[in-house]
Image (cartoon, grey):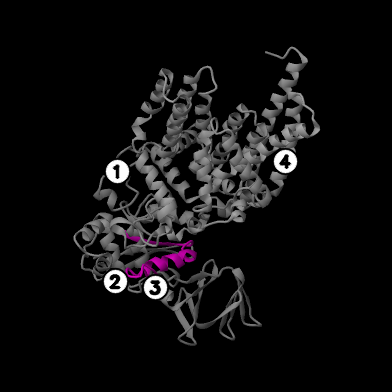
Amino acid sequence: MWPTNSGNYKDFFIQVLKVLLLFGVMWVGLTLRFDDLNLWQKRQAIWYLDRDRPLFTSYDAFFFARLARDYQEGVYQWRKKDPYRGVPDNYLTDNITYPFWPLMSLSAAKLSDWFGATLEKVALYYTPITAVLFAIPLFLYLETLGYTAAGLLGGLCGVTAFIYLIRTSIARFDTDSLNLFFPFAIAWALAMYFRSRRPLLWVGLASLLSFLFYWWYAHPHLILVLMLIFGAVIFWEKRGFEKRDRLALAILFLSNLWYLWKSPLALFKQIWGYVVSITSSGQTGIFKDYPNILQSISELQQTKGLSQVAILTLQNKILFILGLLGAFILLVRERRFLAFLWPFFLIGLLVFRSGNRFAMYLAPFIGMGLGFALHLGMDSLERLLQIEFSRSLKELLILLATVLLGLLVFSVQKNSQAYVAVPKANAFVARDMERLSQVLPEGAWIWSWWDYGYAFQYLSRRAVFIDGGSQGSPKTYYVALSFTSSSPEEARNITAFVAREGLVGIKKRLKDGLSARELTEAVKKGRFYRPPEHPVYWVFTQDLPPKYGWIGYFGTWDFETHRGRFGFIWDLNPCRREKARGVLFCRRGVRVDLEHRKVYLGHKSFLLSEIVFGSPKGIRSQKFSEKGLILEAISTRYGETFFLVDRRSFESNFNQMYILRRYDPHYFEPVLDDFPFMVVYRVKFE
């Protein structure tokens, strides 16, 4: 119906302007993400597996893509054994199975089939597009209360937040892309129950969105909290429940009861994991003496200040503080209607105590707080001038102020504007992973560090012992122990034990009375040695040297002191040799003075005790002293590479087998040598 008078025309114009600004917010978010494509095209040779297969920018993306690929290939069977994860425990127990078809994987598989595009090409666009959708329900929610600026600026701050941009970049293919949309949409639908003439319709919508949210993210406790708040608000207002209220609660709870029953335990585990136990050096329960692998995820350990959180959300400390205060005041002032936003505001505040990722929940609230401040400012202006603006003029002034403040918000997001998403694996490593599907026999198991676990499952189509969803188990410790040990025989014994008995066997031995230290010593000595039924392959990849610090820490774990010693293997590449001065200039400001046998790391200097030269012809060394760091100069078909190691790390199986390619033929057999991108050995159990 077209407007028929000037008043209606004004209202119509203002509503259109609001919609245009909302789409403008989403356009800004899409532009920030898709401007990376220019650089990706220039670096296609190293950031694409082939012409239509851009590589993923998150480790978890390989997991969701693998489930989509399994679905396409007809091997996905819900509640049946997942053959690629957590070996050998997926064969020893019934606990490692395919989950209920993840909505993201299923929808990506369908889109891939419909458009005839690769899963990688679908993922390139999937996450950025879905990531900006949360701005719609957030705007509608706050617009219902008349806080237009809060809705628009909440969306703008959210889509431009540095942490959210990182977690929803091109080719990210991660559930974070709708982890703001569903909470805001459900909260809005539940709030509308109290304002609409058809409240049960909104409850039905909230129930449907809750199911979709669980199908998307599988975290039922977040949904349970919203439903409990819904019931609490009704009870607080009416001191009881009327017939319509009981029907609404039945629609919400009964239709989602099939997964909500898991919520209380899931909520407890989430709080315990992210707030309480995350800073502990050891694990809990029967594995209490083993190291807590979460220690190695540094962003989970860091207690952050205002400046650090501002960098992640709104990169101006003053605006950040104003937005935070404004959000708190808004939530308190409109506590009845906005009660459903409180859980996500509190989740956002976890960023000060726990992981960076929680800042993505906080960012929209910072924008909301700034927008709310505009509304308060307009009210103050009316009182100061003793003038009552007409509703249309007031809205136009608010929109103008929103645009100006929005431009300021965007201008301070310097890190977001400069950010370029980078793949987690380059094309050389990814191609080697695909080669493993031909090089390794069917049924082969991959023994490697956990970060590329999902990537091996997707590209190599082979099973792994640990991955990004199972890295917290003692199996990760034993992988680290085998890598840091200097004994190939110990490494073989450790591999055989884990491949034969897995987590099941570790639990059994501990319950039988062995301590973690006693069990580990027995495993190293081969007391429980039996050849596993599946062939096992050690796989080293280019990403591991920078991670060897923590690998060494866990591998040297002392069960009495609950501490380890950090390993030291520095990838110095690229380096530039200045022959006249005998100095090697490398990245991170590292200088190696070959003539005076000194290594300079920033303002510190260390003795250079030895230079080890590696080439296809063999290994030779030039030793100067017993104490000091060791420089490894390795010739490859890609050029010369340099590594700096300490003595203990130099003697480790990791350094000897990966960097120097020295191995004991009694226990290992080389299968693939594409150093530095990948080196593969078969473990000999005969």
Residue 367 lies in the magenta stretch? no
Q: Quadrant of residue 95?
A: top left
Image-based side of 307 in relation to 647, left or right: right
Image-based side of 177 in relation to 445, left or right: right
Q: Which residues are magenta?
A: 536-564
Q: Residue at x 43, y 74 (%)?
A: 649
Instruction: Say what secondary structure mark 2 lies in.
Output: helix
Q: Position of residue 516 (x, y in %)?
A: 27, 64
The residue that disc 2 covers is: 489
Q: Marks 4 and 1, how far apart in space?
A: 53 Å
The residue that disc 3 covers is: 652
Specify whether residue 34 is in view. no
The quarter of the rendered structure image containing the N terminus is: top right
Q: Nearer the viewer, mark 4 or mark 3?
A: 4
Circle 1 packing at 10 Å, graded few (<14), some (14-19), many (20+), is some
Q: Is 653 situated above or below 506?
A: below
